[in-house]
Amino acid sequence: MIGALLFVSFVVLMLAGVPIGVALGLGGVLAIGLANLDTAHFGLLAVPQNFYASLTKYPLLALPMFVLVGSIFDRSGVAQRLVNFAVAIIGRGPGMLPVVAIMVAMFLGGISGSGPANAAAVGGVMIAAMARAGYPAAFSASVIGAAAATDILIPPSIALIVYSVLVPGASVPALFAAGMVPGILAGLALILPTIWLSRRHGLGQGEASQERPPFWASMREAFWGLLAPFLILGGMRMGWFTPTEAAAVAVAYGLFVGMLVHRTIKIADLFPIFKEAAEISAVILLIIGLASIFAYSVNTLSIIDPITQAILQTGLGSTGALLLLVALLLVVGMFLDGVSIFLIFVPLVMPLMRAYQWDPVWFGILLTMMVAVGQFTPPMAVNLMVSCKMAGVSMEQTFPWVWWLVLAMMISMLAVLFFPPLALWLPQYLGY
């Protein structure tokens, strides 16, 4: 009874407009109070203790730093230089600018780790360029919202850092390595329908008339941006610094590039940059702390075990349970952000993970791909919200375009589901 009340109160509060993190925390506190837990479980004292304990995990130190990296590179001018270099490589023609947008978003994914920040950085450059080439604003918003979703797969990834904190046996380096191939696969999957849609509907006819940037000059301009992922990921691989330290190195590097190389960031710009990153980080960490109260109440009230046993007794098997979970999380992903999904559902599915002996690293990548699809699936797609706002269109106008991209990303996700080595071979090769 109390278990049902826990979930009902959370849903009611969320539908009433209460922020998701607060709804999670209040639901957990209500359940703990009603259960009148004995002193062995600390009663209501468990609320502040779990809130504090959830935020004192070492990997979470990287989270605000990578958020700050996204804010810095958003203002550093790196995105525009990467776009020019990508156009110099790919050339002009119908369907090529959307490919450039996807490739640049994937590359920026190796710098920041935040989907909405990626959508803002790429959208700020590409939406106007695609409009000049004759692409409808709704199509441009769909492509950029979908492309930015690869950001949480390609390391460094804020979502994978959160997952590593929740799941024993899934280290940050292993998850970062495991996300590389699925992230590239997802990007390639998005490229195919964008080219097909562009040519089928005659989009981008004005693109061929635009000048192609010179290769060597654009490469020199993009050099410092191209170097960033190799510094961050290569430094971790070489053992120069941990993932948490890599986040601090990335901040220093971004400030160096923005203030001294490109000189697009002034001293006066630092306060709004730090303020924006602090606000975003505070929201994420507050959700993590409040969700820990919800997770504690779920575990203490033994709500998970009956659900797990019910699924095991249905005879669905490992594949059937996975497909059921995929269907559920794809729907949930339309309404909740990625961090909230991880914090709510990972504790619920961990017993299934142990029962079916799913590899925690592979399952983390699969779950992240589900979240990535949700980031640009209407009606509550965070990446698509950002790109639609920048393009000046409503989300409803993207419907004819975005569903093709959702389908493509889902196909890449199913490939990882049915062929786990796509995610696991790289971390195994690197010895993680």
Image (cartoon, grey):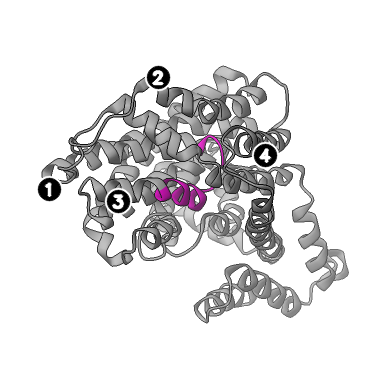
Per the image, label 2 sits on a secondary structure element best described as: helix
Q: Residue at x 39, y 36 (%)?
A: 83
Upstream in sequence: badge 3 or badge 4? 3
Q: Is residue 234 magenta?
A: no
The percent coordinates of residue 302 (x first, y second) are: 66, 63
Task: Assign the C terminus to one quadrant of the image.
Answer: top right
State left or right for residue 112 relative to residue 241. left
Residue labelled with disc 1: 201
Residue kind at label 4, given as amino acid type:
Val
For the residues labelled 4 and 2, the Cα–Cα distance comes to 27 Å
Say which of 374 and 226 sits in front. Answer: 226
The percent coordinates of residue 125 (x first, y second) are: 40, 46
Residue labelled with disc 2: 216
The percent coordinates of residue 212 (x first, y second) are: 28, 29
Residue labelled with disc 4: 251
Say which of 329 and 202 sits in front. Answer: 202
For the residues labelled 1 and 3, the Cα–Cα distance comes to 14 Å
Q: Is residue 116 magenta?
A: yes
Residue kind at label 3, given as amino acid type:
Ser
Residue labelled with disc 3: 140
Q: Are marks 4 and 2 in contact (CB under 8 Å)?
A: no
Q: Residue at x 67, y 75 (%)?
A: 26
For the residues labelled 1 and 4, the Cα–Cα distance comes to 42 Å
Q: Is residue 172 above or below residue 16?
A: above
Q: Residue at x 25, y 48 (%)?
A: 132
State left or right for residue 103 relative to residue 226. left
For the residues labelled 2 and 3, the Cα–Cα distance comes to 28 Å
Q: Residue at x 49, y 78 (%)?
A: 15
For the residues labelled 2 and 1, the Cα–Cα distance comes to 33 Å
Per the image, label 1 sits on a secondary structure element best described as: loop
* Residue 113 visible in image: no
Upstream in sequence: badge 2 or badge 3? 3
